[in-house]
Image (cartoon, coloured by chain):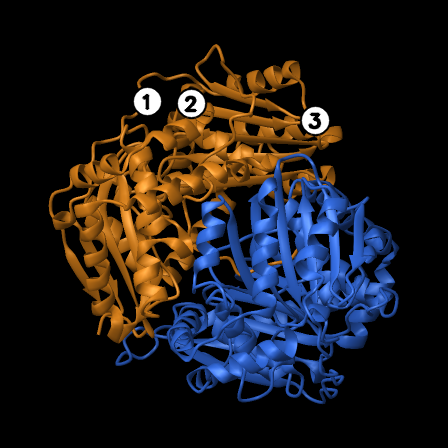
Amino acid sequence: MNFLKLIFIFCLVPFFVQAEQNIQEITLKNGMRVLVKEDHRSPVVVSMVWYRAGSLDEVNGKTGVAHVLEHMMFKGTKTTKPGEYSEIVAAAGGRENAFTGADYTAYFQRLEKSKLPISMKMESDRMQNLVITEEEFKKEISVVMEERRWRTDDKPKAQVNELFNSLIFRAHPYGRPIVGWMNDLQNMTYEDAIEWYKMWYSPSNAILVIAGDVDTKKVFAEARKYFGKIPAYEIAKRKPQFEPIQNGSRRAVLKAPSKLPYIQMGYPTPTLGKDGISNQKEAFALEVLVGVLSGTSSSRLNQNLVKKTSKAVNVSAGYSMLSRGGQSTFEMYGTPSEKVSVVELEKYLKLELKNIVDNGVTDIELKRVITSVIAGEVYQKDSVMGAAMQIGQLETMGYSYKIVDDYIDNIKKVTTKDIQDVIKKYFHDDALTVVTLDPQPLDKNKTPKGRPHAH
Amino acid sequence: MHIKIILISMLLLLSNFASAALNIQHWESNNGAHIYFIENHDLPIVDINVDFRAGSVMDTKQKSGLASLTNHMIVLGSGGINEEDLANQFIDLGAQLNSSFDQDKSGFSLRTLSEKKSEAIDLFTLVLHKPNFDSQIIKREKKRYIASINQSETMPESIASKAFMKALYGEHPYSFPSSGEVKSIKKINKKDLQDFYKNNYLSNELSVVIVGDISRVEAEDLAYKISAGFPENKRAKAIPLVNYNKPQDIKISHPSKQAHLYYGAPIIKRGDPDFLTLYLGNYILGGGGFVSRLTQEIREDRGLAYSVYSYFMPYIEAGPFQIGIQTKKDQVNEAKKIIQKTVSEFIKNGPSPKELRRAKDFMIGGFPLRLDSNKSILAYVSMMAFYKYPLDYLETFTNRIDKITAEEIKSAFQRRVDMSKFSSVIVGSE
């Protein structure tokens, strides 16, 4: 349904979509919501706690604190030592992890079904009794700085992406990196982490999602027992934040050690309204457009720029239809072939959009997007984790999980004219942001080889 | 409708074991292919994976990258159907075609809705049997390979990994970068691909795994169709033994912020009787995510790195035992010392009773998680099939784990893991 950037505390997981959802939900007295989806194919359960707090809610000078708190959540509670819960989960044969996005922070365990209470006990404990000491914080903040070096500082494309976001979003918090600026990490204190925890980790700001081989009624009873008595506190009112309209293109160049140049370009675009209805036409047109351009190996960008004409080594497009922050972008990415400059590649990418405005997309292309979506819904049923992820993301972003029920119908409604209309409305040069990578030699004493780089 | 997530593949061996309840049917085709079938009608999906012994270990140094390019080209046009039409035919069926590749194996998988299975399987069979190896596409893909190799030569992880495999394997084909070298890729032509395909895509080196909504009769028919399209050649090229005796310490400068350290030696091959013991021991040492000794020492106690790990990666011949870490440049020597101390202490004394109990609890208690979807069953059984694990491997797994003693782990590490023979590579050293 979109294109998200998440940061995990440790290793990983992929996914998506689902018809006939059969999801049951209750709201506890303290405002915490509990959603359960039964799937009895295998004796396992996925348990996730989602908090409606992410880098979107951070302020300047304290960027990265949402992610740092995620790390600190593994560092002990009033009654457990740092890492103790990780040992308990592992000894139960479980897998656990956590991730932070712009819109949310989530913690999850995968367990054999009888072990579910371990997860409930642990999550309810660290929701209310987390202990953050200066000593543990100091060690963990260096881990996070290493993570930033590894994830961003030594990866040219990640740096381009960071610069791109900060350029396309001048006012909106989506312009700031989820992992945080290095300077903010260097100056962060354990009090900042405690402040964050006290602001956002109320049960009324959390959602429990359980999927797998469980009995819904029993899960509700367990949830009441473990989470029901946690006192809620008021969550600060969030002010709406909107990016001012862009009047004029924005361009930047990033220099980093690399052989190949690279371009990331994009335009601000609407997201689906929280009711699942407003902006529907435009959001779904953009969703289908990204499928036509970049959904498969024979989609337009790949077919026309990589396969037929060899203008590029790699190209793709991305769009997030969903966001809690109410802002989104439509982006294109590409690595030009030898003898093609990033300037030329930008032109070719724009020509692909113009071609759709002039000639539309074919019925066959629309049908292919629909076919892939329908098959994808069936395939996703093979993943219990995927179901839990989807529910949690939608709900923390402020949508209902039920909007998925209409997803295929909405995709089917999109016409070639709808697609042409969104391109004409949003994809114009005054709204364009472009960041290019200017490759530098590994040895600074050497000048870059080959063709000159025109910017 | 997909979500992309930044993936970090740190716990490489996580998905390595499975459920006893799994009913695996196995038979051999008349031309030597091994077929594994797990019938399951819960979802209207069929998954198929085929693997050939045609990984980069079958490459020659001169034309390294040939095995990978062959694997890659097989899905780019078949039976006279061009690349674009072929891709679209799969898409129009809602089916997914994927290829996979590593040192030992070249693999292809199909995921299809059961209502479209017969068309999808016919198309999949065509892909496997009749690759076009179109000259224009070969030319284009060679350029893309070269671009990607050139780029990887600026990336510290790639530089480190390549140098590490070179240090461990010298002239052995396991040292060849799986996508080849710029020089070797340039030499490859259409005939090379055709010959490589003819000589290495053999029925008697083929394993087929079928999972999902399909009957035994249909599975037999499908397996017959696939295997019948490949020649049998019992004198297939043998893989040379690994001969490692010269450990090296390599340092490569790089303008990166972090230094990347790889540390280890070739140790163990598939089917080695020590494997399970070493695997369990390594979970305690550096395989067990948050709870391993290396993570405790490096990350939890000292905050030196986001990730530190160790693993045994058995191949057909001796695969590497590898320890890896990335850390700020000025910390890498300190980190290396702590790693050395942690590993040598573990070899000397083995695990504590508590550590062993917890590791067993993890393996045994988490057993159902290893096979909780058709996708994970397919991946796991494909590994078993390719490396010819015994059929009762899953049934006996938890039992065998449970019997391993601390003394056995200590002894296996002492016999097999000799730190004085470790090579190390640091990229981004100061």
Chain letter of mark 3 equals B
Residue at the location (23% across, 36% down)? B407
Q: Report which colour depicts chain B.
A: orange
> Callout 3: helix, strand or loop?
loop
Of the two numbered discs 3 and 2 on the same chain, state the one appearing first in sequence.
3
Of the two numbered discs 2 and 1 on the same chain, state the one appearing first in sequence.
2
Chain letter of mark 1 equals B
Q: Report which colour depicts chain A.
A: blue
Residue A425: image x %, image y %? 81, 76
C-alpha span from label 2 to label 1: 8 Å
Residue at the location (35% across, 59% down)? B295
Name the side, left or right, on which A313 lies relative to A141: right
Of residues B211 and B369, which is closer to you in this image?
A: B369
Q: Quadrant of the N terminus of chain B?
A: bottom right
Position above or below: A130 against B227: below
Q: Disc 2 marks which residue? A: B202
> Callout 2: helix, strand or loop?
loop
Asked if marks 1 and 3 fall on the same chain, the answer is yes
Of residues A250 and A71, which is closer to you in this image?
A: A71
Q: Quadrant of the C terminus of chain B?
A: bottom left
Chain letter of mark 2 equals B
Q: Amino acid at mark 1?
A: Ala
Of residues B177 and A88, which is closer to you in this image?
A: A88
Q: Disc 1 marks which residue? A: B236
- Using a 10 Å C-alpha cutoff, classify the residue at mark 2 as few (fewer than 14 neighbours), some (14 to 19) or many (20 or more): many
C-alpha span from label 3 to label 2: 31 Å
Position above or below: B214 against A53: above
